[in-house]
Image (tube, helix red, strand yellow):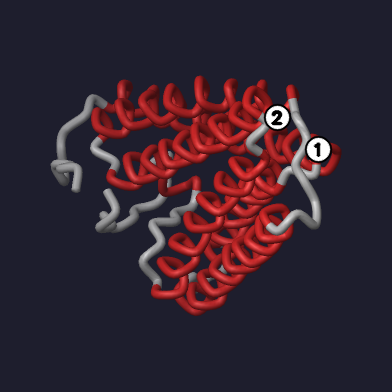
Amino acid sequence: MTAVRPGRTVDPLRRRVLQRRIRLIVAITIAYNVVEAAIALAAGTVASSAALIGFGLDSIVEVLSAAAVAWQFAAPDPEKRERVALRAIAVSFFALAAYVSVEAALSLVGVREAEHSPVGIALAAVSLAVMPFLSWFERRTGRELGSASAIADSKQTLICSYLSAALLVGLLLNSLLGWAWADSLAALVIAGFAVREGLEAWRGDACAVPVSALTGERDVEQCDCC
């Protein structure tokens, strides 16, 4: 758990700079996820890659999760919508895990076989380069600002880089060695991640916060995933 000193003093001018920086990071992350999802789903469909499709769906669910939380905090009394928002997020992750697992199983038993995907490899490589940088930049900014929620969000971004690494390994093994099962294995890793995220959301443990909390416009309690 990353220590964030509550009530730390930050110069007002510097605070505004840091808040604008986090707004920019959050906007870039969301926009990148949308583009990433579109490319991954298109390339995954062409190559019959369960891993690529799962990667794209995960990006969509992450964006929808942010939208669900935004919907929650748009109400005068956000607490009344919290359970609905969390359950919607959880169901989305469970549906993703189920779909990807079935696709991976069909590939493993030979019903369909993932083909090579140069586009998918390039996407995974770019994501692996971009996501850790965004995570590091947001974590550094969050620590200076004293924002537990920004640090938590940065760790969520870092997890996405782990998925990018799993996807890249699976696609490379399939392309270079012809190991089609590696694509399915990468898909199952993504499905496992989705199940974990779904369970956390269902229990109410998800560290999902609105953009207004990340930018300091709204107070938010420090959560355990920080």
Cβ–Cβ below 8 Å for labels 1 and 2? yes
Query: Compared to 68, does 19 lie above or below?
Result: above
Residue at x 32% of width, y 40% of height: 151
For disc 1, the marked residue is: 47
From the viewer's side, name the closer residue of 192 and 169.
169
Q: Residues within 10 Å of mark 1 (few under 14, many from 20)?
A: some
The answer to whether residue 45 is left or right of residue 40 is right
- The amino acid type found where label 1 is placed reads Ala
For disc 2, the marked residue is: 120
Rendered image: mark on residue 171:
none
Earlier sequence position, callout 1 versus callout 2: 1
- Residue 178 spot, x, y in % from top left: 68, 31
- Residue 143 spot, x, y in % from top left: 25, 32
- Alpha carbon separation for disc pair 1 and 2: 9 Å
From the viewer's side, name the closer residue of 54 and 199.
54
Q: Secondary structure at mark 1?
A: helix
Query: Compared to 18, does 179 lie above or below?
Result: below
Q: Residues within 10 Å of mark 2 (few under 14, many from 20)?
A: many
Residue at x 72% of width, y 53% of height: 107
Q: Quadrant of residue 94?
A: bottom right
Residue at x 45% of width, y 37% of height: 162
From the viewer's side, name the closer residue of 44 and 30.
44
The answer to whether residue 78 is left or right of residue 112 is left
